[in-house]
Amino acid sequence: MAMVSPATSESKLSQNRRAGAADRQPLDSIPARIVLAMQGVTKSYPNGRVALRGVDLIIPEGDFVFLVGPSGAGKSTVIKLLIRDELPTKGLVLLDGRDLGRLKRRDVPKIRRRIGVVFQDFKLLPNKTVRDNVGFALEVTGTRHRDIVPAVDRVLRVVGLTGQADQLPGQLSGGEQQRTAIARALVHNPRLFIADEPTGNLDPVISWEIIQLLLRINELGVTVLMATHNAEVVTAVRKRVVALENGRIVRDEVGAAYHRED
Ligand code: ADP
């Protein structure tokens, strides 16, 4: 797993934000080590629905960002643009400086591997063990068997599932299933880890365990973007909060609560 210094990039970002500059800088002058940059992104769906309106968002390496906002605000659309399920109607989406909107079709899988995603409903393969669910993610990209085994063991250790490696998803608790999904998303050493409502199906205690795990993964150097409605968690951990409303970013604050406090 790439080791970076989250403190450095976070402090650089907050300096920029204090100066009110981060969202307005032209792309050729933004600081180095930006994982994600969205500039002037508008997304209209074919039915005419405008999901995002002129969104500017910069996420530096090592950041931990909560993406919040009411249902319909545009959170899923942001994620769909990042995993290139959708293309922006206007504006740029850059991952590690690569313009996702202009990617050649054959480069899409390579870029997708730089992003690890987990969803509310885990999306595990029911007939494969924990180990095989995680290993399968590497198999499909042609990784050699002798490289898969240590990589899978390593991420299962990170998520605390070494003891359950040979169980099927149906034999696991909800929290363990989400840990399996997290291990699978991590096994490619992603540049950006996206969690879309990862605690949506979990009770409060297990939700906390999952959040603690995501914080730990972030401490290991992985940049994390988590879309959530979980106000209690967001307010308790005091990370960067980006709030969307009606397709616009209405708040972008470091160390913030779920709801505006001023
Ligand atoms: P959120 O994840 O915050 O609930 P979404 O990104 O799902 O928000 O939705 C933003 C807006 O875009 C909503 O008005 C929604 O109805 C619309 N929308 C989302 N996906 C589609 C789609 N595939 N086709 C048409 N409209 C869509």
Image (tube, rainbow, N blue to C red):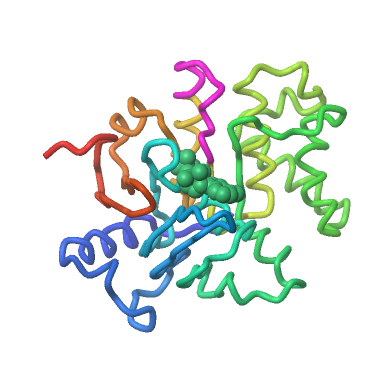
Furthest residue toward front: 47
- Relative vertical location of residue 94 with respect to residue 119 in this rendering, above or below: below
Where is residue 219 shown, x and y percent of the image? 44, 46
Report the front residue among 177 and 25: 25
Question: Does 96 appear in magenta?
Answer: no
Task: Work out which quarter of the rendered image holds the C terminus and state it.
Answer: top left
Which stretch did the figure color magenta?
196-208
The answer to whether one can see residue 175 in this image is yes
Q: Is residue 166 left or right of residue 198?
A: right
Question: Does 206 appear in magenta?
Answer: yes
Q: Residue at x 22, y 70 (%)?
A: 21
Report the front residue among 79 and 222: 79
Q: Quadrant of residue 155?
A: top right
Q: Is residue 180 left or right of residue 1?
A: right
- Relative vertical location of residue 156 with respect to residue 27 in this rendering, above or below: above
Where is residue 91 shown, x and y percent of the image? 45, 72
Number of marks present in the image shown: 0
Furthest residue toward left: 262
Q: Is residue 159 left or right of residue 26?
A: right
Report the front residue among 235 and 247: 247
Where is residue 153 shown, x and y percent of the image? 73, 40
Q: Residue at x 51, y 75 (%)?
A: 97
Q: Quadrant of residue 52?
A: bottom left
Report the front residue among 117 and 56: 56
The answer to whether one can see residue 217 in this image is no
Q: Residue at x 24, y 49 (%)?
A: 253
Task: Work out which quarter of the rendered image holds the N terminus and state it.
Answer: bottom right
Q: Residue at x 81, y 54 (%)?
A: 147
